[in-house]
Image (spheres, rainbow, N blue to C red):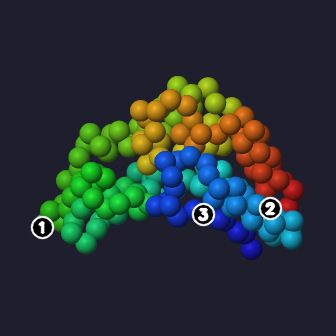
Amino acid sequence: MLGNFQRVWQDRNDNVEDETEEKITQIRNLFRDAGFAVNTNYLLHGVSNSCYGDKLNHLLINYNGDVYGCTARDFNKENRIGFLDSCGEVHYDYKKLEKRNNSKLAKAVCKKCRIAPLCGGGCKQRAMEGLDTEGCTYHYSEEKMDQFILDIFEHSFMR
């Protein structure tokens, strides 16, 4: 059995690592030490198993006809990428859709990052939300990148 701890997205404080992140890492390590296989916390899905919301054919249609690309955000007008009309046709906000679809690895820091092939720039939603910021979308330090690489190696080859 493979464990995968995920933080409730609404509980995150401006994508800054805090006490909760530290506790998740400690708990994950306790499970590992007890012999359980536990996925890394650093990336939700990575490149090889990307988020369902990253797939080009993924849509989430809300009860009121609003269309979204991600389930991990509030269902409001600002976050929607389109709407379903009364005939069942989706009308996209093509500016939002293009921004969302082109956000992964769009930042200069991602193009030079040593873990870009593993990370892929994050999910489309996080990558899009981080386009206007400097630095890594996930705020990885060099130490975190090293730990991530070791975790992937351990998970892939040491089990």
Residue bearing the label numbered 2: 29
Residue bearing the label numbered 1: 86
Instruction: Measuring from the top left, give residue 16's x and y in whole percent.
Output: 56, 46
Instruction: Measuring from the top left, give residue 12's x and y in whole percent.
Output: 51, 56
Quadrant hosting residue 95: top left
Quadrant location of the C terminus in the rendered image: bottom right
Residue bearing the label numbered 3: 6
Give the distance between the C-alpha atoms of the residues marked 2 and 3, in whole angstroms: 14 Å
Q: How many marks?
A: 3
Looking at the image, is mark 1 or mark 2 earlier in the sequence? Answer: 2
Give the distance between the C-alpha atoms of the residues marked 1 and 2, in whole angstroms: 51 Å
Relative depth, front residue between 41 and 70:
41
> Which amino acid type corresponds to the residue marked 3 in the rendered image?
Gln
Q: Secondary structure at mark 3?
A: loop
Instruction: Measuring from the top left, give residue 37's x and y in whole percent.
Output: 78, 66
> Which amino acid type corresponds to the residue marked 1 in the rendered image?
Ser
Relative depth, front residue between 117 and 141:
141
The disc at residue 51 is none
